[in-house]
């Protein structure tokens, strides 16, 4: 963005500030809007094997690209480069927009789902190295999660405040309205549920995607604006922007099992977990 010094007067700046700080009311992006925005570029379900033209195809003794070792590079130019993780050779690049929440692999490792801040989700097929489709699920999207059976894509939106559940063909099936600002949504594969926290509401929601998106609401001592889910899916680490405590929440016991004092809100999305001498550890950035 260019500098506006000398272009805007103090009065102009005051008007801009007044405008952008106005409260938002009646922000709408309906199921009908989502359906109209949906584009499916290629029908890929009928493709049961990797096509011979694909770099991932293995010819006899000649090894193709290992699709379990694909590296994705999110670029400032609003594109994603698909790289062979063995030699970091670029295989393809596709345009998506300003990604937020990070691209997600399907559990089959065949597809990539890339969400943008302005609500567009792009589906990309690694077998064919082509876009499979896209859809606009909201005005301001936080992040997405994929069900462990690859049947559902859950998109958490700030604006409008909801969670949109899409089929694997990006068709909206159910919209869950929320009364709070969602911090993030993740998948609990062991329980067949999505879990989400809120930036302004002291709750965790467990959403069962095998039982009609039933919700179990779990009370918290304060909102978890940011969370990190352990790979063992037994605990959640949570914190709030204005808080001074890092919480360790047990998903099995459904309660806080420990707390630590902290200065500000750590970046829990960057947390990494490891085991040593029968103990579990988490490392995160402050």
Image: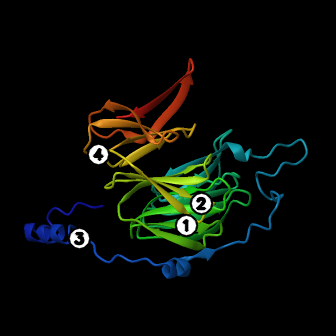
**Percent coordinates x, y for residue 121 in the rendering:** 54, 65
**Res. 165 mark:** 1
- Of circles 1 and 3, the one toward us is 1
- N-terminal-most mark, 4 or 3: 3
Residue 231, horizontal then vertical, whole percent:
56, 38
- Among numbered discs 4 and 2, the one appearing first in the sequence: 2
Q: Residue at x 27, y 61 (%)?
A: 2
Label 4: how many Cα within 10 Å (few below 14, some 14–19, many 20+): some
Q: Residue furthest top?
A: 277
Going from the N terminus, do you reach mark 3 or mark 2 first?
Answer: 3
- Tell me, yes or no, if residue 244 can be seen here: yes
Circle 2 sits in a helix, a strand or a loop, which is it? Answer: loop
Helix, strand or loop status at disc 4: loop
**Sequence-wise, which precedes: disc 1 or disc 4?**
1
Eye-nearest disc, 4 or 2: 2
Pointer 3 residue: 23
What label does residue 241 carry, if any? Answer: 4
Q: Which of the pair 10/228 is nearer the observer? A: 228
Dot 3: what SS? loop
Residue most extreme to the right: 60
Q: Is residue 103 visible?
A: no
> Label 2, on which residue?
209
- Give the alpha-carbon distance from disc 1 to disc 4, as whole Å: 28 Å
């Amino acid at each position: 963005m260019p500098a506006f010094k000398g272009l805007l007067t103090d009065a102009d700046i005051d008007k801009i500030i007044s405008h952008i700080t106005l409260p938002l009311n009646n922000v709408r992006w309906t199921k009908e809007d989502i359906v109209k925005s949906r584009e499916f570029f290629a029908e890929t379900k009928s493709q049961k094997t990797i096509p011979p033209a694909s770099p991932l195809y293995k010819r006899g003794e000649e090894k193709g690209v290992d699709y379990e070792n694909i590296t994705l590079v999110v670029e400032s130019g609003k594109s994603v480069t698909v790289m062979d993780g063995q030699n970091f050779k670029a295989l393809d690049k596709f345009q998506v927009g300003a990604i937020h929440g990070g691209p997600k692999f399907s559990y089959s490792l065949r597809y990539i789902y890339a969400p943008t801040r302005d609500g567009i989700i792009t589906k990309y097929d690694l077998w064919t190295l082509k876009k499979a489709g896209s859809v606009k699920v909201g005005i301001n999207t936080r992040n997405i999660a994929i069900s462990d059976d690859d049947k559902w894509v859950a998109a958490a939106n700030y604006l409008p405040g909801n969670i949109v559940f899409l089929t694997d063909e990006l068709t909206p099936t159910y919209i869950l309205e929320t009364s709070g600002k969602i911090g993030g949504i993740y998948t609990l594969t062991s329980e067949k549920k999505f879990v989400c926290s809120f930036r302004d509401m002291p709750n965790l929601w467990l959403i069962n995607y095998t039982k009609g998106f039933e919700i179990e609401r779990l009370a918290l001592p304060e909102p978890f604006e940011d969370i990190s889910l352990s790979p063992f899916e037994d605990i959640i680490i949570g914190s709030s922007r204005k808080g001074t405590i890092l919480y360790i929440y047990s998903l099995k016991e459904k309660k806080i099992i420990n707390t630590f004092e902290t200065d500000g809100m750590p970046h829990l999305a960057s947390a990494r977990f490891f085991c040593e001498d029968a103990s579990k550890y988490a490392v995160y950035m402050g």
